[in-house]
């Protein structure tokens, strides 16, 4: 390979190895001088446009000459605008390339790091769009593509972990820690819960730990149960008993909402995968309980499926059914107008 190609590959490899903060520093050091040059070009264009617009018409006596002078000024104005816009397009394309070379890394970033990166790119795109007067398509398109990739990875990991949890679910009632009731209360108020942002894996691990910790609650004497736990999750005054995988599903849904609220470009793909997540849980619960999958030795190994198991699976699903209108309202607040109209026309479930 030519030396310049080897140099580019080495640069890309080094960029991929950088920590998020270090990479943001590199992007900031690229953006700052670019924006200085673009602002100078924009100032020159604005001055030229003003001078040409204020120039007096050609002296009377030759209509053709007057028309020719005005046409010449119009050509100069158009050429200046095109040159300034072209410079902005080139800068945006180069910036987008630097984003693209780390696309696989960005798709697996924690939410906080991905949010910070998107804010940096959005600021650059807004500055370029302001200077060019015709948007910043290259950066906007790359940001949208990386937002979708981020959601795809998030959803794949969450689905895999949730399916594994449902596969081993014993369909016994667990008590509900107070923090989960607070999550539900926030959603019922059409608000994104203010839990600290974390990766989907963190949410799933935390919920699994809670589920394991409270799984033996039925064996505890009533007087010894912790006051911070409740037997039901309450949604709009109605109580629902839940199983451990139901808490994990709720935690995952909350993380999806946090992602959509934190990064505007993430909200549309989140609105697409959230119904898929809910339907997937319903499908696996149906197979495990109604089709007796939980009795298999490779699954939970239950000796039988009782009415109690059926009731608990129904109640766990009932929590999300009761929250569906609120989930839809929350997502709609973060969707672009066109996506909002489409979401309103189709059910979330």
Image: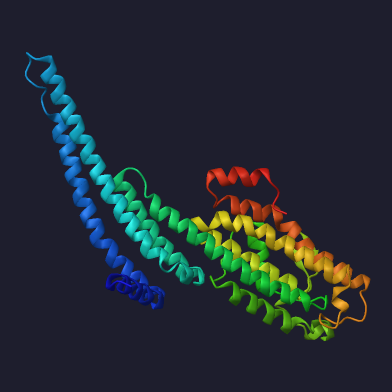
Position of 19 with respect to 345 (left or right) is left
Q: Where is residue 51 shown, x and y percent of the image?
A: 13, 35
Quarter placement of the C terminus: bottom right
**Where, by quadrant of the figure, is residue 191 drawn?**
bottom right
**Quadrant housing the N terminus:** bottom left
Residue 57 seen in this snapshot: yes
Left or right of 346, for residue 304:
right
In depth, the one of 326 and 338 nearer the eye is 338
Q: Relative to the observer, which residue lies in front, 109 or 100?
A: 100
Residue sitting at x 61%, y 55%: 271
Most extreme residue toward the front is: 1
Which residue does the image show at 28% across and 47% down from the upper left? 86
Counting from the top left corner in percent of width and height, residue 248 is at 69, 72
Q: Quadrant of residue 63?
A: top left
146 up-or-down from 172: above or below: above
User: Residue at 48% of width from left, 56% of height from top?
Assistant: 144
* Residue 176 in view, yes or no: no
**Residue under the point 93% across and 78% down:** 304
Judged left or right of residue 286, residue 34 is left
Query: Would you say 249 lies left or right of 139 here?
Result: right
* Residue 196 or residue 126, whichever sits in front: 126
């Amino acid at each position: 390979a030519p030396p310049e190609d080897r140099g580019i590959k080495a640069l890309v490899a080094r960029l991929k190895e950088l920590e998020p903060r270090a990479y943001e520093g590199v992007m900031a050091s690229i953006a700052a001088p670019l924006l200085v040059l673009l602002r100078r070009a924009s100032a020159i264009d604005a001055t030229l446009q003003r001078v040409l617009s204020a120039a007096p018409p050609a002296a009377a006596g030759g209509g053709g000459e007057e028309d020719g002078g005005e046409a010449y000024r119009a050509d100069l104005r158009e050429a200046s605008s095109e040159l300034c816009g072209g410079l902005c397009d080139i800068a945006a394309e180069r910036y987008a390339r630097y984003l693209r070379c780390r696309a696989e890394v960005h798709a697996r970033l924690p939410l906080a790091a991905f949010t910070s990166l998107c804010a940096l790119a959005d600021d650059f795109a807004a500055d370029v769009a302001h200077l060019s007067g015709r948007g910043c398509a290259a950066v906007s398109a790359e940001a949208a593509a990386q937002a979708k990739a981020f959601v795809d990875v998030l959803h794949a990991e969450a689905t895999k972990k949730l399916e594994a949890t449902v596969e081993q679910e014993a369909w016994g009632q667990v008590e509900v820690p107070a923090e989960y009731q607070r999550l539900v209360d926030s959603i019922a108020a059409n608000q994104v819960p203010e839990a600290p942002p974390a990766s989907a894996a963190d949410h799933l691990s935390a919920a699994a730990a809670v589920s394991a910790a409270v799984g033996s609650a039925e064996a505890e004497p009533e007087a010894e149960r912790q006051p911070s736990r409740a037997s039901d999750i309450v949604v709009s005054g109605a109580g629902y008993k839940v199983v451990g995988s139901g808490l994990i599903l709720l935690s995952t849904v909350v993380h999806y909402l946090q992602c959509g609220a934190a990064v505007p470009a993430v909200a549309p793909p989140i609105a697409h995968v959230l119904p898929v997540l809910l339907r997937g849980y319903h499908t696996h619960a149906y197979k495990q309980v109604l089709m007796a999958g939980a009795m298999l030795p490779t699954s939970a190994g239950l000796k039988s499926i009782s009415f109690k198991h059926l009731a608990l699976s129904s109640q766990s699903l009932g929590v999300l059914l009761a929250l569906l209108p609120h989930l839809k309202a929350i997502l709609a607040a973060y969707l672009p107008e066109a996506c909002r109209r489409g979401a309103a026309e189709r059910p979330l479930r």
